[in-house]
Image (cartoon, coloured by chain):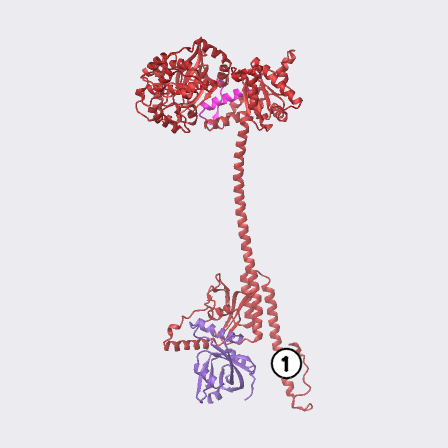
Chain colours: A red, B purple
Amino acid sequence: MSDSIQRDPPATEPGRDAGESTGTPAWIGAHAEELARKTVELARKTTEFEVLQRVSSDINSTLDLEEIYDIALRTMDDLFEFHHANILLVEPGGETLAVVASRGYESQAMGGRARIGTGVIGVVAQKRTMLHVSNLGQKRAYAAAQRRQMMKSGRGAELGDAVPVPGLANAESQIAIPLLIRDELIGVFSIESPVRRTFSEHDRGLVSIVANQIASAIHNARLYEERTRAAEALQAANASLETRVAERTAALERELRVAEALLSDARSRVEGPLLGESPAARAVRDAIARAAAEAGPLLLVGPPGAGKEAVAHAVHGASRRGGGFIFVSCPELHAQPRHAGAETIPAVRPERLVLAAKLELASGGTLFLDAVDQLPLEFRYALQELLEDYETRSSDQSPAPNVRVIASTTRDPRRDVESGRPDPLFRLLSRNRIAVPALADRRQDIPVLVDHFVRRQARHLGKVVDGVSAESMRRLEAYAWPGNIRELRTVLERAILVSRATVLEIDEELLDEGIAVGSYRLVARLGSGGMGEVWLGKHRLLARPAAVKLIRHDVERGPAHEDLVRRFQREAQVTSGLRSPHTVQLYDFGVNDTGSFYYVMELLEGFDLQHIVTRFGPQPWERVIMLLRQACRSLAEAHAHGLVHRDIKPANLFVTQLGSEYDYLKVLDFGIVKDQPGQEATMLSARDILQGTPAFMAPERVLGESVVDGRSDLYSLTCTAYWALTGQVVFHASTPAQMLLHHVQTPPTPPSRVAELPISGDLETILMMCLEKDPAKRSASALELDAQLASVPCLEPWTQQKAQAWWEAHAPEVAAHNHRGSARS
Amino acid sequence: MGTARLPAEIRPVLDNGVPAVMVTCSADGVPNTTVLSQVYYVDETHAALSFQFFSKTIRNVRENPRAYVCVADLAGHANWVLQLEFQRSETEGPIFDAMDMQIEAIASATGMSGIFKLRAADIYHVLSVEKLPHSQWLAS
């Protein structure tokens, strides 16, 4: 435009002479007019440039949509003075546009919509081309006239409905510009005027420029908004994720703590006595680590109950041996009678065979010889020879058994050396040696050991115990602990057994002589079963040893419990009235502070029939007759008092030495609380099934017949005899239910067909009769059965001499067996 | 008659699009008058007329290509009279699209889509252009 302003005037006006003068020459007037026009145009373009510069600056300085709309509307107003403008954006779905900003409309509501393809705005959106429509009023009128014409001519059905569109109702001019980003429609900018307006090509170009800037700004702002929203959503998701991760982490940490506790518990089953941070405990653990790396024999020296077996387990575990841990109680070792195979190798002593068999069993693992100082003399030589043999083989690189031998002793072998009489066996064993300290020498470990044993025993008994009181702990720490850790464990077990509080109180009395039950004090636990625990007890005044049986039950205190107590007392009274020497003697009975029943019975040393058959195999039929007859005499008295045992089985027939009499049989567990409510289920617990209760149950008891008399005991007694003669139960079944069904339905196989030892035919006839399903076909009473057994011809009866020989041969085992807690009452 | 040029000042008049009057004549000399919704400026020597309904007009034009169009310049208080000669019909292309958009924008909002529509953009050669004051137009 400036070039036009600066253009030189023509030298002459066409049609006029150069020298002609008529005042102001016409060409000058025309030139001035042109100059003025161009000046106006320049001013307009300058304004436009300024507006465009401003809009460009303003619109690019913000990412706020509302500000962008405002700038866009203001700019169009500045440029074209339309005063009425709408910005519409395509809505999701792409079929409509919604007004997002507007200016100049008095009644224009935000949110008005235009359908794509309808009206000026809709057509612009559809065609994506700018459209200027002027003289709208007349055009609408013309269309309306055409519409009326059609209706008059009967074509009204072809017509659609008029569609309202956003904008001025009386607009005469409208220009709508598509807002495009890379050919994609995002909206329409529409400006309107109530008067007719024209748009030159220049105007259209200007509108396009502004529209493009608006479209870019809106697009950028929306992208920014989307990203902001996405960032916020991401942040929220992150926060949620962080929360979830934190929750999951906390849950995993809880699981880890539980797993660690379980692991610690699993470890402490072996390492329990090794817990603690005392120098002595640390020294033992260090010694274990060193010993685990060695392969030679290891000797553990320490006082009784100090945890030598735990140390042996720890060495075995740390050495990562794949084989098993074989425990051998040295006092119980005895040689088997020579059999046919051994006789062909007369040079091999049976003791050596026994030890070799144990070593073979421990192949790849550890053979633990407990109390090796109590090893019978003949075994000492055999063990010494074997160890020397292995040593020789190791030195000349011959294959030697891969067995770690660990032995324990309470006798310090160094004393033998000092006395000048070194034991060759100990010399071999003690090349590697660990001294296991007495508890008194590691007193600072007592709290952690107490915590360990309390938690373990409480869990075992299903009790909630938080620990021991401070006063009790002080007492425990001050006590001498002559029995070491074993005594500590026993004291805590007894305390937990009788405690009803969550914090244990250990009184002086408990530490001295044990807990009181009736007139007895519990000294040591002998064993436990499904119905309760058996403890070694001592009478407070008589100092008589006894077996105290604590009976577990699940009946809450209340009328049912009181009824149960009455029945227990009644049965106990009946049992205590039994005088047969073959019935275990009942000293006392009652209910202790925790509501458990207890009864005190004579303490017997020996084996029950279950153990005898399991340990020594099927018994000669002559011995079985002798034992059965004693049981019959016990049962005969009970049946005469109307008392049915209901649980005759090998484990309840106890064989003992009484004074000068050998193979003296006592019937245990007579009638007491067998039929208390819900007890049947306990009787059928897994443990009892293993002990054989269903295997010895009479058919009428299986069928639940209301009247069960002594003949059901005779059936069970016969099943017990079957076991003693054959080492097998009468029926074999994989489940208790199948076993019970066999008793009801299946004819038994005669014992002679399954026994390895010969059986008297007369005895078998009696036994098969007593195994009849119908009680009426069995012996009528225990006395009758006793007489029938007495009449069986017997060429080599089981005499007292034979019995004495048997007991003397197994005396060490009896002692060890009862020492280890298997004594029964 | 030769070719005339459309002056620049006629463009806003055409853009404003006041319905124009078109006069045609059949081969046997019978005239016909109709109203056009759009006279579109193509270039200096051509204009396009919207072909929508008038079958008689188109028949006349096919018989006799000459036509008169009178466009009212309301703002200028004048009328423009164009003498045109039919050249061709276009049913697509930029000229058709531009004219179609104008018509569709109105038709779609008045329920007449598909009825009030552009059938063709008829391209005419401008033979003469005459600007007459309103009074003279009315007199003629």
The quadrant where residue A361 appears: top right
Q: Is residue A352 visible?
A: yes
Residue A312: x and y in percent read 58, 23
Residue A741 forms part of the magenta stretch: no
- For the stretch drawn in magenta, the main secondary structure is helix
The local secondary structure at tag 1 comes to: helix
Q: Residue furthest front?
A: A344
Q: Amino acid at mark 1?
A: Leu
Q: Is residue A18 above or below residue A790?
A: below
Residue A663: x and y in percent read 43, 12
A739 and B110: which is toward the camera? A739
Q: Is residue A555 visible?
A: no
**Label 1 marks which chain's residue?**
A
Residue carrying label 1: A35
Question: What range of the chain is rendered magenta?
Answer: A484-510
The quadrant where residue A519 appears: top left
A483 and A376: which is toward the camera? A376
Residue A107: x and y in percent read 45, 67
